Amino acid sequence: MRTETIALPSGAAITLRQISLKEENYLAGALRSRRANQDKVLVDVVNRCCQGFEEPGPYPWAEGGGKVNWQEMLQGDLIAAMIGLRKLSYREGKDYEIDVKCPNRVCNHKFGYIIDLDKDLFFQKLSEESARKLREDETFTVKIGGKTVHFKLGYVKDDQFHEKLEKRFPGRGMATMLRTQIVRIDEVDSKDMMNWLDGEGNGPYEGLLADDAEDMREAFFAVDCGVDTEVEVECSRSACGNVFNMDLPFEGMLSPGRTMARKRKMRRQTEMRDAGKEGSPKPPDAEPEADSETSSAD
């Protein structure tokens, strides 16, 4: 069984062992179940495969090694560990095949697309100043809408808080996402923070403008660490060629996915498209034609 020490964006390092068939069975059952919390299942599998800390990074409680407590770690570290576990567990794990539907309403083409987890994702490391504040339990600040907002970095455990906010404030998802990381706002009562953010509900505020909300999200991202999981995808249909962005799906991240032969075929097609060669590669779900892998998909 292979093991590997994975450096995380926060500066911590953990040892992972590869996924077993037992964990694959567990994942497959969860993906088929409508009742299973798939995010929780993914965290559980990463936790099962994690053998402990090699470097504590910014986590004082991890000094001396020992068991990893994902709930007390940054979300960016968990995503990076998930990606590292996939690459460790499967021979071609860096090639992550996803199912995509072109958002162009004239096209709506469905196709498979390979994400190169080494090249197509941006990893941001935690700065020394952010690590110091995390160790000393200090908040970060940003001036938004004339108020000073005190906020913290995004932890794995914040998902539970966000779920509670969504149940309490349905239909206000953009505001609840921001509220999850906010500790306090100067001169704003804690019960009015949601009203200050979006102007909804009972309260004295009109809410932030879109550019203020964008500035806040940028401030959150600038001091945090992790993985930018937005990827650029090009429609494989030659008559379309639409280029669009989408969030990387994690449902199949820790599953073997398609056969390696099919992945190699898709990789060649992707490389040809990226090189700008004439013609369009056949989508992987199309019928084969006379030994030609570069024939048109239409």
Image (cartoon, grey):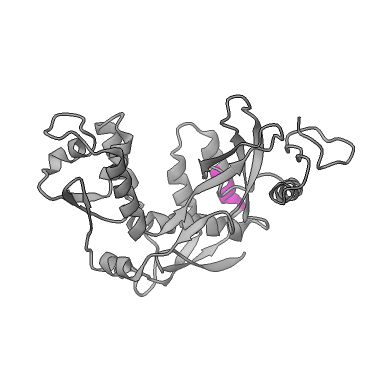
Point out the image quarter for the N terminus: bottom right
Residue closest to the eye, 43 or 246: 246
Q: Is residue 114 above or below residue 34?
A: below
Percent position of residue 88, x then y:
60, 61
Percent position of residue 231, x then y:
54, 47
Q: Can see residue 61?
A: no
Percent position of residue 236, x then y:
68, 38
Q: How many numbered callouts?
A: 0
Which secondary structure class fits the magenta region best?
A: helix
- Residue 77 is left or right of residue 185, and the answer is right
What residue lies at 43% left-to-right and 57% top-to-bottom? 226
Residue 239 location, quadrant: top right
- Residue 276 is left or right of residue 228, and the answer is right
Residue closest to the eye, 193 or 104: 104
Percent position of residue 81, x then y:
48, 58
Magenta highlight range = 21-27
Q: Is residue 162 above or below residue 102?
A: below
Point out the image quarter for the C terminus: top right
What residue lies at 27% left-to-right and 49% top-to-bottom? 181
- Residue 96 is left or right of residue 251, and the answer is right
What residue lies at 56% left-to-right and 68% top-to-bottom? 4
Residue closest to the eye, 181 or 282: 282
Q: Can see residue 148?
A: yes
Residue 67 location, quadrant: bottom left
Query: Which residue appears farthest toward the right when viewing the image?
Result: 290
Residue 139 in magenta stretch: no
Query: Which residue appears farthest toward the top when viewing the image?
Result: 106
Residue 188 location, quadrant: top left
